[in-house]
Image: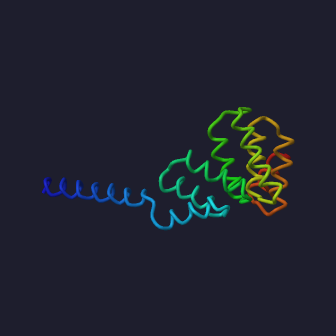
Amino acid sequence: MKKISTVLLAAAITFFVSCNNVWAEDDEVVKSLKIKCEDGVARACYLLGQRYRTVDMDNDTALAFYIKACDKGDMDGCNIGGILTQQKGLQNSKYWKDAFKLYIKACEAKNDSACANIGSLKYREGRQKAAIKYYKMACDMGNIVGCNNTQRLKR
């Protein structure tokens, strides 16, 4: 019985490992997205970022695609690019300054999540008034986190 369990476990591990390899290779959809991204389609660059972040768990490659998406006008790319950039550094580092630039571009384009993320960044920097300002902006756009954090910090 123990031998059968061991064989089944080994077969299951082999199956899951081989499935991951299938997903990691560029399929026709990924190839098409890469061509569209190179041709200037911002959303294609964003979707490639999503793919590399979630399927390959390759944040560096994902970040490059999010930044391309942002540069081409996709504000979700700016926001998630900001998150990945901020995660690379510590408070007041170059990475946080770069993250702020990505967030502010999206926030000014009315991306509520980016405004809330600026609020969080400013709060972690110890700048409560600035945090409230951006949380309130996010709240005014309907972001629940922004509303909750605005109320919490104004107490």
Snapshot colouring: rainbow
Question: What percent of the width, then of the height, locates residue 108?
Answer: 83, 55
Nearest the eye: 25 or 14: 25
Q: Please indicate whether residue 114 sits to the left or right of residue 51 in the image.
A: right
Q: Please indicate whether residue 39 sits to the left or right of residue 131 in the image.
A: left
Q: Please indicate whether residue 24 sits to the left or right of residue 93 in the image.
A: left
Up-down: is 112 above or below 59? below
Question: What percent of the width, then of the height, locates residue 86?
Answer: 67, 41
Residue at (71%, 32%) from the top-left corner?
Answer: 93
Q: Please indicate whether residue 89 sits to the left or right of residue 149 in the image.
A: left
Nearest the eye: 62 or 1: 62
Rendering quarter of residue 5: bottom left
Rendering quarter of residue 130: top right
Nearest the eye: 26 or 82: 26
The quarter of the picture where the N terminus appears is bottom left
Nearest the eye: 73 or 153: 73
Up-down: is 43 above or below 59? below
Question: What percent of the width, then of the height, locates residue 144?
Answer: 75, 60
Question: What percent of the width, then of the height, locates residue 46?
Answer: 63, 59
Rendering quarter of residue 145: bottom right
